[in-house]
Amino acid sequence: MVIAYLRVSTGKQHTENQQEEIRRFAEQKGLTVDRWVAEVVSGKKKEKDRQLGKLLKTLREGDTLIVTELSRLSRTLLDIMTILNRCLEKKIVIYSTKDGYAFDNSINSKVLGFAFGLVAEIEHNLISMRTKEALALRRAEGIHLGRPFGTTVKQNRLLENRQDIVRMYDRGATIASICKKYKVSRETFYVFNRKYQCVPIAGSRKDVEN
């Protein structure tokens, strides 16, 4: 099966030029396009979130994919190489009409496929390494990582019951009993109280369960 993939970034652009170019290319190669897949989406969007992702899953050995430019597959080099390598592994032929590239079962394409796969793996490892180094640096600088104490839901729960919390505290309730009633941790309550200053916790005996 021969499939043509067309992509534009915005609705103001049109795929007619791509379609006409692929038709001319197919005629020169003696190919008949069996299916046209066109979509309006940014090339920066992940492949799995585009029609391209679904298309690649349906391709089988011996199929041919035609695009006008490799950049129609993605705007990032890593994604392009990953897609090309996957297609070469499945023995899917890819033609890029403007670029003049032909990725088939030839030895040159196999070498390219190996190179693409290697570069993609190296880039993936570099991204992972940069992420880990950035996180380690933030920890060394004392920056708290992850979710802060008290989720928005729990903070909102305390805020909605702010007046009741003040009344409970004034009637002698301990912080522990207030936390138990509203199903929050002490850390969450302290974060909330520092922000809204509902009760004078500092130095109070009521901060400890009797």
Image (tube, grey):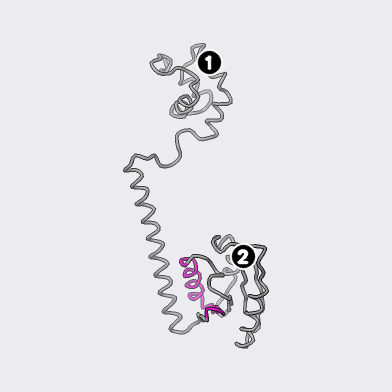
Looking at the rendering, which quadrant does residue 124 occupy?
Answer: bottom left
Q: Earlier in the sequence, mark 1 or mark 2?
A: 2
For residue 168, the mark is 1
- Residue furthest front in the image: 12
**What count of labels does the image hold?**
2
* Left or right: 83, with 209 as reference point: right
- Residue furthest left in the image: 140
Q: What element carries label 2?
A: helix
Q: How many residues crowd around disc 2 within 10 Å: few (fewer than 14), some, or many (20 or more)?
A: some
Q: Quadrant of the C terminus?
A: top left
Q: Is mark 1 on a helix, strand or loop?
A: helix
Q: Is residue 37 above or below residue 155?
A: below
Measuring from the top left, give residue 15's x and y in whole percent.
66, 71
* Left or right: 95, with 19 as reference point: left
Looking at the rendering, which quadrant does residue 2 occupy?
Answer: bottom right
- In whole angstroms, how far apart are the C-alphas of marks 1 and 2? 57 Å
Q: How many residues crowd around disc 1 within 10 Å: few (fewer than 14), some, or many (20 or more)?
A: some
Q: What residue type is labelled 1?
A: Met
Q: Residue at x 43, y 84 (%)?
A: 107
For residue 54, the mark is none
- Residue 28 belongs to magenta span: no
Measuring from the top left, give residue 182's x and y in whole percent.
53, 25
Q: In which quarter of the image is the N terminus?
A: bottom right
Measuring from the top left, give residue 46's x and y in whole percent.
54, 60
Measuring from the top left, give residue 72's x and y in whole percent.
56, 70
Q: Which amino acid does label 2 sit on?
A: Gln
Q: Please state which of residues 91 and 151 is positioned toward the viewer in this rendering.
A: 151
Q: Residue at x 40, y 18 (%)?
A: 202
Q: Is residue 201 above or below residue 30?
A: above
Residue on which the image places disc 2: 51
- Residue 97 belongs to magenta span: yes
- Give the magenta part as a residue range: 77-99
